Image (cartoon, rainbow, N blue to C red):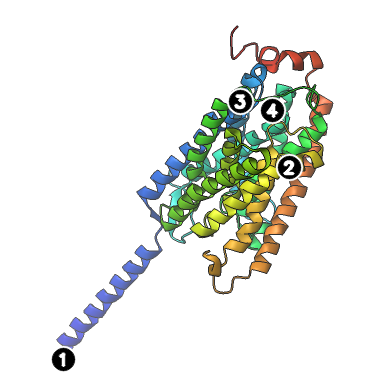
Amino acid sequence: MPFAGLLVATAAQAQDGLAQAADAAAAAAPIVDKGDVAWLMVSTLLVVLMTIPGLALFYGGLVRAKNVLSVLMQVTAVFSVIVLLWAIYGYSLAFGGEGLIIAGFDKLFLAGVTPDSLADTFTDNVKLPEYVFIAFQATFAGITTALIVGSFAERIKFSAVLLFSVLWFTFAYLPIAHMVWGAGGYLLGHGALDFAGGTVVHINAAVAGLVGAWMIGKRTGYGREAIKPHNLTFTMVGAALLWVGWFGFNAGSNLEATSGAALAFLNTLLAPAAAALSWSAVEAITKGKPSMLGAASGVVAGLVAITPACGSVGPMGAILIGLIAGALCVWGVTGLKRLLNADDSLDVFGVHGLGGIIGAILTGVFTAPGLGGTGGDDFSIGAQVWVQTLGVLITIGWSGLVALVAFFIVKATVGLRVNEETEREGLDINSHGESAYES
């Protein structure tokens, strides 16, 4: 080859090499998609909607008229406290590093987090602004802790609610969240599947609430007087807002606006619909009439049960999970409640606890590709069900122990329960100096 031709060939090869290197660098560069960012922001707003007003109205309608504002206030205050604590130290301990049980203190007060810092998604080079991920996860922590107040509504001191919430969030929610979702987390490492919080949110909160119901004791007149919901319209509106908000809760947990989010979205539509019908059918058979309260409770039971499974089971699996959860949770708020001998005021354990356990375990079944799930060819139902059961048992034990210690601390400091006169008059007037309905 002539010398001039050799130079041209060498230059062309060099250009090709540079182009390949540039392509490789571009492929490895983090991608921040505006659609993903927008979806996570919307999802965060939807989870706020789930809590305030969704959960607040759902709970508020279930209590008596003299206590409705106290429940609205407890949900609002607990959510507000927890999202602040999340920014101060919660995010750091849950997601600020690697560890089996907890992360670290590197991001206390969000140290090092800037508009340019990025958080991981489930795709290697696709990222999110870290601020968006922090906000999204803050709403999870807030609603989880707020769920607990339904177990001991109508007789607990407001100061006790706040102190307990801080203790339980710090020593129960944060470790469980890290073990399931955080880098190096114990349950994550064992392959536990919890797409949006069956263990982290629902079982975790329900166990704490059950411990509280036992420790605080039954409401005055429980079992001897009629204690009826004062406004089932509120409860229905709250259930509807929970269902709408849950699309952000579940589909947002995909962290990207992709087909994975679409699957979670569809499953979040199907499972609660199936659960509402199965709950109503059981009521029609056993009581002769299906109730609106039952249908609303069935919706929530279906939402709870599909939460851990929504990203890994197929649509038909979601329907079956909803049908099973709706039917079994009727027993959860009747037979199981009697067996536990607890005045779980708003049936947090019967719906969120039992529903979460059902959903977590059935995730290990319906994720199987032969049943329409997204599991790989080597997926084993038996092995996965065992891992799911391990996650359930660890969550029950950890949350229960932390709640027990926390309630003892609260009892020894500010006290747990209002006096009988205050309870009979109502917490709205005595704890907050106002009334929902002026006579």
Which quadrant of the structure image shows residue 69? Answer: top right
The residue carrying mark 1 is: 2
Between circles 1 and 2, the one closer to the viewer is 2
Which dot, 3 or 1, sits closer to the camera? 3
10 Å crowding of disc 2: few (<14), some (14-19), many (20+) = many
Q: Name the residue that disc number 3 marks.
A: 60
The percent position of residue 293, horizontal first and vertical second, equals: 60, 33
Residue 44 is situated, as x and y percent measured from the top left of the image, at 48, 40
Residue 58 placement (x, y as % from top left): 58, 30
Eye-nearest disc, 3 or 2: 3
Q: Which residue is mark 4?
A: 162
Mark 3 or mark 4, which has the lower sequence index? 3
Q: Which of 205/228 is in front?
A: 228
Q: Going by the image, does 105 lie left or right of 219?
A: left
Q: Is residue 151 left or right of residue 45?
A: right
Residue at point 72% right, 35% down?
A: 167
**Comparing labels 4 and 2, the label whose residue is closer to the camera:** 2
Question: Could you tell me which quadrant the C terminus lies in?
Answer: top right
Q: Quadrant of the N terminus?
A: bottom left
Q: Which residue is under mark 2?
A: 207
Compare marks 4 and 1 and give the one earlier in the sequence: 1
Q: Amino acid at mark 1?
A: Pro
Residue 432, labelled with which disc? none
Is 372 in front, or is 90?
Answer: 372
- Mark 4 → mark 1, Cα distance in angstroms: 85 Å
Which residue corresponds to the image point at 79% horizontal and 35% vertical from the top-left? 342
Tag 3: residue type?
Answer: Gly
Which kind of residue does numbered mark 4 sit on? Leu
Residue for point 67% across, 45% down = 329
Q: Secondary structure beneath disc 4? A: helix
Please tell me how crowded label 4 is: few (under 14), some (14-19), or many (20+) other residues with Cα within 10 Å.
some
Q: Mark 2 or mark 4, which is nearer the start of the sequence?
A: 4
